[in-house]
Amino acid sequence: MSKHISSLAPSVVVDTAAARVAVSQMIGRISLRARTNENGGDLAAVGKAIGVALPTQIGARAKADGIEVACLGPDEWTLLVSLEQIEKVEDALAALYPSLPHSMTEVTGREVTLTIEGPQAAELLSIGAPRDISSIKVGQARRMLFDGATVVLWRDSETSFRMDVWNSFASFLATTLETGAKELAAELA
């Protein structure tokens, strides 16, 4: 497993009437690139091997047996797993390689997750997002830019999001979200 190098420890960054931003506990992450091939390799085999079918529509998510998968591109997925499941999932994917060549990289230490929740969570995200946050439906995930940094945004409910961000940008984005949450809360006062 890769080493966690984030300068942010799991904690609450800010908690206001508008939104709450927190750093989540470390979770296992695997980046997967694969596609059906002419040798009979089929993406359905991945789902059977890891216990959750790969969604094929960009932005779609699936979850089963403690594994959450988001489709980020036509041949790209992010898998979120418990730290204890990483080796099992890697072994299951490696066993498929002869029939379904793919790229699998364990990237646990690369990113940190910020949770953004509250009545103005979507509005808070709009301060750094060039896209309309409402276009990301509940249950979807999207790779996007946030204040110049590439992130993956998971929408868990109308007022709850998770943002996966590379460690090198995490402190900056946490500070940006903290400032924004305080400004939104001041408008409510």
Image (tube, rainbow, N blue to C red):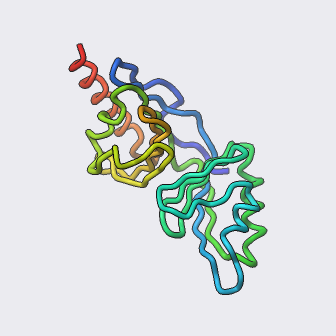
Where's residue 125, x and y in %? 33, 38
Is 132 placed left or right of 104 in the picture? left
Task: Classify 56 as above or below 39.
Answer: above
From this view, report whether residue 51 is shown above or below residue 176.
below
Residue 131, image x, y percentages: 29, 50
- The answer to which of 63 and 5 lies nearer the viewer is 63
Q: Tell me: residue 13, above or below residue 96.
A: above
* Residue 176 visible, this orientation: no
- Farthest residue, direction bottom: 38
Which residue of the protein is positioned furthest toward the top in this rendering? 189
Say how many tags the image has.
0
Q: Residue at x 63, y 46 (%)?
A: 28
Estimate the x, y position of residue 47 in percent, counting from the top left.
Answer: 70, 61
Q: Quadrant of the C terminus?
A: top left
Query: Residue at 61% across / 46% down in the picture?
Result: 3
Residue depicted at x 50% and y 42%: 112
**Residue at 74%, 47% in the rendered image:** 85
Location of residue 17 (image quadrant)? top left
Q: Position of residue 154 (x, y in %)?
A: 47, 45
